Image: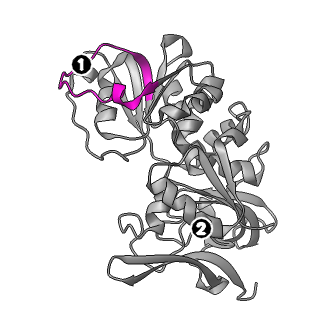
Amino acid sequence: MDNRAFKAMIVTETEEKQFVRAIGERHVDDLPVGEVLIRVRYSSLNYKDALSASGNKGVTRRYPHTPGIDAAGIVAESSAPNVKPGDEVLVTGFDLGMNTSGGFAEYIRVPAAWVVPLPAGLSLRESMIYGTAGFTAALSCLRLIDNGVAAGHGPILVTGATGGVGSIAVAILAKCGYKVMAATTKGAETSYLRQIGANEVISSSEVDDQSGRPLLKPRWAGAVDTVGGNILSTAIKATRYGGTVTCCGNITSGELHTSIYPFILNGVSLLGIDSVNCPAPLRRRVWKRLSGEWKLDHLDTITTELPNLEALDERIGLILQGKNRGRAIVRIGD
């Protein structure tokens, strides 16, 4: 392919700690080394993208930069024997959109090991409705199930339930027959959460215990925590004997203050969820579930589709203000 120009979001540090983002022009030769060049059709907006697009150097060290930790599209060029031009593929996780030029662009170039063939049963658009958030939610649910938490054991708590990970976790668990208790700060979204499968909606304040007690009255058989901090601590303390809590986010805090008592007296398991460097066999297993038995019936209910890259700016502001609901995807090419 010639050194063609393409559109991309470009975030630039204009002076120390001052950043601007704009849709500009890049060239294929500007992209990093990799075996696979992909013409992007859809991407999605995650909290990590909003941080990168705002100059957060805990996510992205070097600017100018193109964010976008998710991308789905068609292979334009490939030197890898197992990836062919014309293949429909997706990329989530690894370093895409962090320090490697990401999916908020018409082209990405990545190592072949990052590329996942589009699973049968999913369109490129649907794969980005899931994206990293949906993959993380599904991985959390899979770990709960693999660790022995059955639907008959009691309700499953999902924190940050209106967010991307939370919304999809609620929907997957409901589809699998679990009773779901959705915790949110957004009481106005109760009908939305019930629509996607929540049996009960509670305020996040009910999962923010300030008593200092090491154990609380058991309320749920397991939990998918997306926010961290004291809410995670509370979720652990109120989990029933033998239950499991998964942890995948730190939007409230990266610190965890608890005691060993839930673990040694109630046999609670705490499982960390890493969707970035997830091994390929597990990654494909999760995507197979999402395209098959866990494919959601109401994907559009949780989705806002942005028509182009220019529409990302406003949505980035909403996600940083905590006003985002569900998933936002962006259409990049025809």
For marks 2 and 1, give the one nearer the viewer: 1
192 sits to left or right of 246: right
Q: Which residue is drawn at 44% across and 53% down?
A: 321
Rendered location of residue 121, percent (x, y): 79, 42
Residue nearest the viewer, comparing 124 with 303: 303
Name the residue carrying label 1.
215
Front one among 268 and 303:
303
At label 1, the amino acid type is Leu
The part of the image, by quadrant, that contains residue 195 is top right
User: Picture quarter containing residue 244?
Assistant: top left
Query: In front here: 206 or 84?
Result: 206
Identify the residue at horizontal 33%, vertical 76% (top origin): 17
The foreground one among 98 and 278 is 98
204 in relation to 98, above or below: above
Classed neighbour count for the residue bearing mark 2: other residues with Cα under 10 Å, few (<14), some (14–19), many (≥20): some
Quadrant that contains the C terminus: bottom right
The kind of residue on which mark 2 rests is Pro
Q: Where is residue 211 in the image (x, y as percent from the top left)?
A: 19, 24
Q: Residue 111 carries which label?
A: 2
Q: Which of marks 2 and 1 is nearer the N terminus?
A: 2
Locate the N terminus and report the quarter of the image it occupies: bottom right
Within the magenta stretch, is there residue 221?
yes
